[in-house]
């Protein structure tokens, strides 16, 4: 992995928004997913199942139990009464809608490269000839401070930078609360997971996803199936345009965001730290022909040069450590070079079963 050169994109970058707005009737071949990966867009296939809702203001202390159940069953939940000001959330959405409405030349000033991914992007992964996803995004780094470069954030619309900072500060507070709740939910000391993440030296990034209208949504995906490589993700999704689907066994369940709620999911670093007590869950995004969709994904990650391996309290004689130590800096190179590949990274990172017998890796991990 260390030899992968993440310097430039392997092909000229085409903005999905430009394609969409050109009014083409058929999508280019390199956005057409293989049959097995195509979404089923007919309604009702998820049987009415939905991800759990956790009320952070519950008065009876049931939050941790609700989180434990949600993480075991789904790896995903929605949080309500989370304390983040509704007006701020609406302003954050509005500045990003305005950013994506800017003329292409304005946005191109922020064109990103795979070296850091910061800026305006249209692909994840550097494999030449890859089947691409139907979405553009803006990616930026909020923490650690030394990696924060507000001059790389959009100068327009006015107030974009301040709003991003304000939104980031609030989401950071929310993630700190969630990390404590996750610790308690596992029967750990309240500060156990926060400490394993590096205390105050965590990483935080924001990925604003913009999924333009797609003339053939049954052939494409806005974001291919993946688990999030980091710690926890707090997603703000449009409650008027569905798109996020979460894997439940062999089905994909479409999430219906509650107005004002955030969608929370645990990433691979939590799966590793908890010795797979909690598992990161695959999810993907479907697109649609009538409406564009915007989402804000806030990623809360461990300090990037800290070795992450299962916490001692969750390693026992019956459940030995399943993952070797790896820093998040190293871990995230996989998705940055290969793009979204389901759960193949965390699966191949598992070196032992719970009895510490070496795991048999399939000769070719599902791509
Ligand atoms: C992500 C993600 C989901 C969405 O950015 O990692 O899963 O609904 N986004 O945009
Ligand atoms: Ni994701």
Image (cartoon, helix red, strand yellow):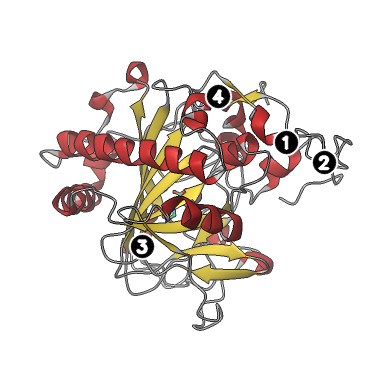
Q: Quadrant of residue 77?
A: bottom left
* Circle nearer the viewer, 3 or 1: 1
Q: Is mark 2 on a helix, strand or loop?
A: loop
Q: Which of the two discs, 3 and 4, labels the residue nearer the N terminus?
A: 3
Picture coordinates of residue 317, whole percent (x, y): 82, 34
Distance (Cα) linking label 1 and label 2: 11 Å
Q: What element carries label 1?
A: helix
Q: In which quarter of the image is the N terminus?
A: top right
Distance (Cα) linking label 2 and label 3: 46 Å
Q: Which of the two discs, 3 and 1, labels the residue nearer the N terminus?
A: 3
The residue where tag 4 is placed is: 329
Position of 211 relative to 339 (above/below): below
The residue where tag 2 is placed is: 353
Position of 71 relative to 336 (above/below): below
Q: Residue at x 43, y 56 (%)?
A: 62
Distance (Cα) linking label 1 and label 4: 15 Å
Horizontal side of 105 relative to 111 (left or right) equals left
Horizontal side of 195 relative to 256 (left or right) equals right
- Are circles 2 and 4 on residues that touch, CB within 8 Å? no
Outermost residue toward the front in this view: 60
Q: Which residue is drawn at 26% across and 32% down?
A: 153
The residue where tag 3 is placed is: 20
The label on residue 349 is: 1
Q: Is mark 3 on a helix, strand or loop?
A: helix
Picture coordinates of residue 125, whole percent (x, y): 56, 40
Distance (Cα) linking label 2 and label 4: 25 Å
Horizontal side of 213 relative to 189 (left or right) equals left
Horizontal side of 22 relative to 202 (left or right) equals left
Q: Which of the two discs, 2 and 4, labels the residue nearer the N terminus?
A: 4
């Amino acid at each position: 992995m260390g030899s992968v050169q993440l310097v430039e994109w392997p092909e000229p970058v085409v903005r999905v928004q430009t394609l969409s707005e050109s009014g083409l009737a058929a999508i280019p071949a390199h956005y057409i997913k293989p049959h097995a990966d195509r979404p089923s867009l007919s309604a009702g296939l998820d049987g009415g199942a939905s991800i759990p809702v956790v009320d952070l203001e519950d008065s009876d202390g049931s939050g941790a139990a609700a989180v434990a159940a949600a993480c075991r069953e789904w790896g995903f939940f929605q949080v309500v009464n989370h304390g983040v000001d509704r007006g701020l959330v609406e302003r954050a959405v509005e500045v990003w809608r305005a950013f994506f409405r800017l003329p292409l030349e304005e946005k191109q000033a922020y064109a990103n490269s795979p070296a850091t991914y910061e800026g305006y992007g249209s692909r994840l992964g550097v494999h030449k000839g890859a089947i691409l996803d139907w979405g553009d995004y803006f990616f930026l780094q909020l923490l650690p401070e030394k990696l924060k470069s507000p001059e790389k954030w959009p100068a327009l619309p006015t107030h974009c930078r301040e709003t991003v900072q304000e939104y980031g500060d609030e989401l950071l507070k929310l993630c700190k609360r969630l990390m404590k709740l996750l610790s308690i939910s596992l029967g750990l000391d309240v500060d156990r997971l926060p400490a394993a993440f590096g205390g105050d030296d965590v990483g935080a990034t924001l990925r604003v996803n913009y999924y333009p209208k797609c003339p053939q949504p049954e052939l494409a995906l806005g974001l291919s199936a993946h688990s999030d490589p980091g710690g926890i993700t707090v997603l703000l999704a449009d409650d008027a345009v569905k798109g996020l689907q979460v894997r439940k066994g062999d089905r994909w369940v479409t999430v219906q965001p509650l107005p004002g709620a955030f969608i929370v999911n645990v990433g691979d670093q939590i799966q590793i730290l908890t010795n797979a007590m909690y598992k990161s869950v695959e999810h993907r995004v479907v697109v649609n022909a009538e409406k564009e969709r915007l989402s804000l994904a806030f990623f809360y990650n461990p300090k990037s040069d800290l070795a992450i391996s299962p916490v001692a309290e969750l390693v026992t004689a019956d459940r030995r450590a399943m993952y070797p130590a790896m820093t998040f800096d190293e871990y995230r190179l996989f998705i940055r070079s290969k793009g979204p590949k389901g759960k193949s990274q965390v699966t191949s990172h598992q070196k032992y079963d719970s009895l510490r017998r070496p795991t048999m890796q399939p000769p070719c991990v599902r791509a």
